[in-house]
Amino acid sequence: MIDIGKIYCGGSSTGDGLRYGTEAGADAHGNAPHARPLSAGVRRPIVVWSTTRTCNLKCVHCYTDSENKKYENELTTAEGLKLIDELADFKIPSLLFSGGEPLIRPDLFTLIEYAAKKDIRPVISTNGTLIDRDRALAIKDAGVVYVGISLDGMEEVNDTFRGVQGAFSRAMQGFENCRAAGQRVGLRLTLTRRNYQDLHRIFDFIEKEGINRACFYHLVYSGRGSSMFKDDLTHSESRHALDIIMERTDDYFRRGQDINILTVDNHADGVYLYLKLKQTNPERAEEIRRLLEWNGGGAHSTGVGIGNIDFFGNVHPDQFWQDYTFGNIRERRFSDIWLDESEPLMHGLKHKADYIKGRCRLCQYRAMCTGSMRVRGYRAYGDFWAPDPQCYITDEEIGLDAANKQELIEKNEAFPLPRELTA
């Protein structure tokens, strides 16, 4: 995640310790800040647990390819409680209950309450359509730190994207019920060509509805989103989207609005923010460079600071790698699987800087980004260490000259950009 308020505007949030190694205070809901690890590389992972594959919607970009039906052999309540014990022993900072749609799982609150008692920060990722008043109160009472509700545009755009008419209005009712219960809640939106031109309207909506946190995700090619180059932003559109996000976040900040804005799943955003700040405030830009290099971008994300356990207990590098499994928690403890570098990809993910190829290897800002999302490189080129095709920082900006380009050609590392992203 790139905290726009922190990096671009000089603000802070409870996640600063994990992301940047800096001090932070409690949030407005009384949630304590994350503890600071000695370095980003020794962080325990935030675990995304896909608690069920069943979902009441049919989103066109769903990474689990979920449907509204029952799936057999999902982890039982007893297995879930045992898993939480193991994750607590491993001292993970947070457990994100995801799906499918997690609120469909009947024992969800039992699991959440148990995680909270084990000093694991519980978070829910939901489409919000099932959060009535009673569920909102139950979420609050269970000890959930944060609820992220997914929207993918305004009204008709969201409903088309989600595959169910009325999904937007029901999600909005979920927002209102969470706020009424005093539950911290925010918006999650995946940037695509279907919605990015609505960004100003979305920012107006965030303020009007009193939403105090919003995460803008870059599209990751997985599940039903695996063939969505056509829906992904081009590089010029990505830059335009970041310009709008920075402009509107800065406006919130200047007017004293307590709204936390983040971008997710593209560490090139940090480089872009750094280059923008370098033009207007070089001294602050260098401070930001140090924070981003402490974080390391992709170096300490997938396989280090984030991991996924699916509905059947399979452990994946992150939630977008459902087709690559390290092991199963029914057979081995999560910590044993996660720390086992005899598995080649796990070793590589924990040492990404030694393996990244192409323009990422030669980028003068590689310490801030370290190749960003490995799964996108793999989806585009069939190579775990190929460049992330969503990097929109230009060759000139990263210092890639003619000699560098020739070297890449000679080493067979001149990966061509997918045509759909070049406009």
Image (cartoon, rainbow, N blue to C red):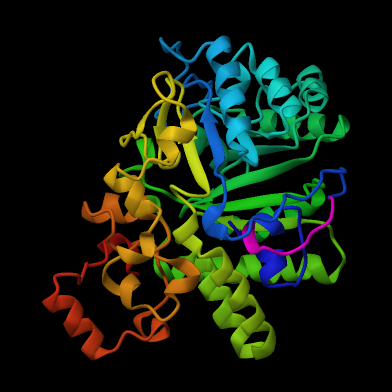
Quarter of the image with the N terminus in it? bottom right
- Which residue is painted at 73% across and 72% down in the image? 9
Q: Position of residue 255 (x, y in %)?
A: 86, 68
Q: Is residue 20 magenta?
A: yes
- Which residue is painted at 57% across and 51% down in the image? 43
Quarter of the image with the C terminus in it? bottom left
Magenta region's main secondary structure?
loop
Depth check: 63 or 319 in front? Answer: 319
Q: Position of residue 381 (x, y in %)?
A: 22, 56
Whether residue 141 is visible here, answered yes or no, is yes
Query: How many numbered marks have been drawn onto this rendered protein structure?
Result: 0
248 vs 60: above or below: below
Q: Position of residue 130 (x, y in %)?
A: 67, 22
Depth check: 124 or 315 in front? Answer: 315
Toward which corner of the image does residue 70 lie, by quadrant? top left
Toward which corner of the image does residue 127 lie, by quadrant? top right
Q: Is residue 400 left or right of residue 367?
A: left
Depth check: 240 or 286 in front? Answer: 286
235 vs 179: above or below: below
354 vs 50: above or below: below
Whether residue 228 is visible here, answered yes or no, is no
- The stretch of residues the image draws in magenta is 19-26
- Which residue is painted at 55% across and 37% down in the image? 47
Q: Is residue 378 left or right of residue 140?
A: left
Q: Is residue 271 magenta?
A: no
Q: Position of residue 98 (x, y in %)?
A: 56, 30
